[in-house]
Image (spheres, grey):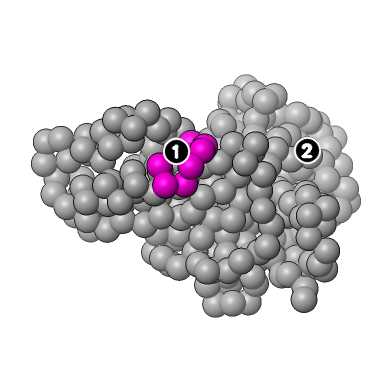
Amino acid sequence: MTISIAHLGPAGTYSEAATLAYVDGLKQRLDRSYVLKPYSSIARTLQAVVRGEAQLGVVPVENSLGGSVAVALDTLWQLDALTIQQALVLPISHALLARADALSHLNVVYSHPQALAQCQLWLERYLPTAQLLSTQSTTEALEKIHTDRTIGAIASSRAGQLYDVPVLAHPINDRLDNCTRFWVVSQSGFNLGVESPATELHYVSLAFSLPKNLPGALVHPLQVLAARGINMSRIESRPAKRSLGEYLFFIDFEAPGARVFWEDALKELETHTEIFKVWGHYSVWHLCD
Ligand SMILES: O=C(O)C(=O)C[C@]1(C(=O)O)C=C[C@@H](O)C=C1
């Protein structure tokens, strides 16, 4: 059976690059054929998995410079039907692509908001007067250029080659060690049949809302982890989209060793929450670009 994998498109996005590298890794573990399915937004990528149009979906969730990809976390919470199979970390090296001969000819730069955020200092320094406009993906930004010599796009050099747009500057991200974490998700209950060795560091990701906005409400669930010596690797709050000041909390923690140890922690943690969702237990693959 062919495994179909949804990702943010069109061709040339970093999400596609992460998916291609993931497929390379999968091929070494699972003798199947794979087909990639591009979608026009991160939310639609996740919805495609829920609708069964693809068995897996690859979405960016966090970048070392730009922080969380809010739409991915918010959509995961709303959809409530997905499980994380794998995390992927991809190095991200942005290029400024344009048909212009010099930076001074550019009036507008398009890109995905995450890519614009990752190049913020560079843009302030070299293109302080250019208008910065958002697109759904870095390759959608490239499509805006057509033949216009006053428009630039931030995307990968690989995308520049695919769309035949020259590189005007590279790398332009504010730190060279820029990288993005992606989650590979499936419908809950889907078994990919890939065992990750216990030697790989494993994580658990979860999210919850709190029963009441009272003093100490967040401390209690956190104490459950601290009391067991469980190392939290991320905590992120997002608006609950109910009343002002109500939040959802997204937590990742390291989960080595016996399953029973952290499963017990989850049971106790749940008692301190209102809505409680566990996204999964998974390992991380560090990909090469
Ligand atoms: O627009 C793309 O190329 C994407 O795959 C999206 C995305 C993101 O949302 O973080 C992925 C990796 C980079 O951080 C920049 C953009």
Residue tagged by mark 1? 253
Could you give the CA–CA distance between mark 1 and mark 2, rounded to whole angstroms?
A: 24 Å
Q: Is residue 76 left or right of residue 105?
A: left
List x then y, in percent, for residue 89. Answer: 65, 40
Q: Residues within 10 Å of mark 1 (few under 14, many from 20)?
A: some
Circle 2: residue type: Cys
Q: Magenta region: which residues? A: 254-261
Residue 288: give its label: 2
Please indicate, yes or no, whether residue 283 appears anywhere in the rendered image: yes
Do tag 1 and tag 2 residues touch (Cβ < 8 Å)?
A: no
Residue 184 in the image: state x and y as whole percent: 61, 55
For badge 1, the amino acid type reads Phe
Q: Is residue 133 visible?
A: no
Badge 1 marks a residue whose secondary structure is: strand
Above or below residue 203? Residue 140 is below
Front one among 277 and 101 = 277
Q: Residue at x 67, y 53 (%)?
A: 195
Mark nearer the N terminus (1 vs 2): 1
Q: What residue lies at 79% left-to-right and 31% top-to-bottom?
A: 169
Q: Dividing the picture into quarters, in which one does residue 221 lie?
A: top left
Residue 183 position (above or below residue 132): below
111 relative to 82 in the view: left or right: right
Residue 80 among those drawn in magenta: no
Q: Nearer the observer, disc 1 or disc 2?
A: 1
Local crowd size for mark 2, using a 10 Å CA cut-off: few (<14), some (14–19), many (≥20)? few
Q: Quadrant of the N terminus?
A: bottom right
Q: Is residue 227 left or right of residue 66?
A: left
> What secondary structure is marked by label 2?
loop
